[in-house]
Amino acid sequence: MALLEAADVRGRGPLINRVVEIHGLAGSIGEQLTLAWAAEQDAQRFQDPAIERDPQHLEDIQSAQRMAVRALCEMSTHFLLGAAHSLANLVLRAALCSLSAASVINASKRNRKAKGFEPNTDLWTAWPTFSSSLTVELWAKELPQAAEASGLEPLKHLVARLSMLQQDPRFKALDERRSMDYHRRRPQSLQHTSPHAGVWSYNEATKTSTIKMVASSADARRDETLVHQICVAALTCISEAMDDFEPLLAESLSACHLAWRPTDARWAH
């Protein structure tokens, strides 16, 4: 508070609450990354070649293993997507600590429903979704413009690092896998007779319909090794981003006359 008073910053109380909110987000991200890592470690154990497998039931064991590994990896990616979403909203909240940046963000018609992104609000419109898509103008356009308007170099670097994460091929692969698994048709782990191309077709030239009889087959995208690779790569890239964000966050808040870590904290009685 003393830093804000010395700088004659208006609206000091809400800014203090903003820092508390940012602290909460940082802790939440840390827990999400820890849970993502724990699930990924279990996925490794299921694939351990040293595990004894009954050769008489090898096919059944492999099917069960495939489903287990995919389930653990998807659990991990669930937490990773949550961490990335929280990380983006943490950067947004850091930008809102600058009055100049906040003016740019809140001036957008698309952000009016967020009602100023009040600290610790439960309003869902104040927690915009973060993805690899560059069509969401808040992340691709408005936040970088707000950082420029602030004139604060640390905040510009912080927002630029978020853009790097958004365009990272490892994060894109995670986001695309999520889109397939949750928004389209998740590939089955077992063999099945429901091919993606379907079984019926129509020939306009001959005016004939054809139905193909298909045998049971495996979907190539069910590969648990591929899913695991996507999981590990995403865990690495989001963890790297978090490592880079912490010093930039501290510098950004300091530039806004806010302390990330109190230098002379005292217990309240």
Image (cartoon, grey):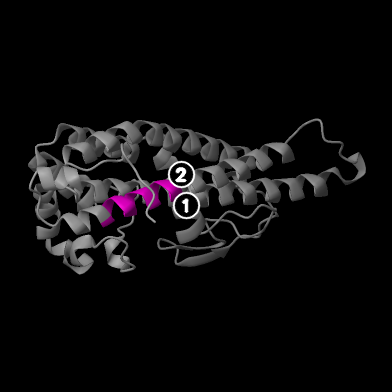
Residue 233 lies, in percent from the top left, at 49, 34
Q: Residues within 10 Å of mark 1 (few under 14, many from 20)?
A: some
Any part of residue 184 in sight: no
Residue 183 lies, in percent from the top left, at 45, 60
From the image, tell me which residue sits under label 2.
174
Residue nearest the observer in this picture, 40 or 197? 40
Is 203 placed above or below 173 here? below
From the image, tell me which residue sits under label 1.
178
Tag 1: amino acid: Arg
Image check: 257 left or right of 84? left
Alpha carbon distance from label 2 to label 1: 6 Å
Residue 11 picture quarter: bottom left
Q: Which residues are magenta?
A: 17-29
Any part of residue 70 in sight: yes
Answer whether labels 2 and 1 touch (C-beta < 8 Å).
Answer: yes
The rendered magenta stretch, by its main secondary structure, is classed as: helix
Residue nearest the observer in this picture, 1 or 91? 1
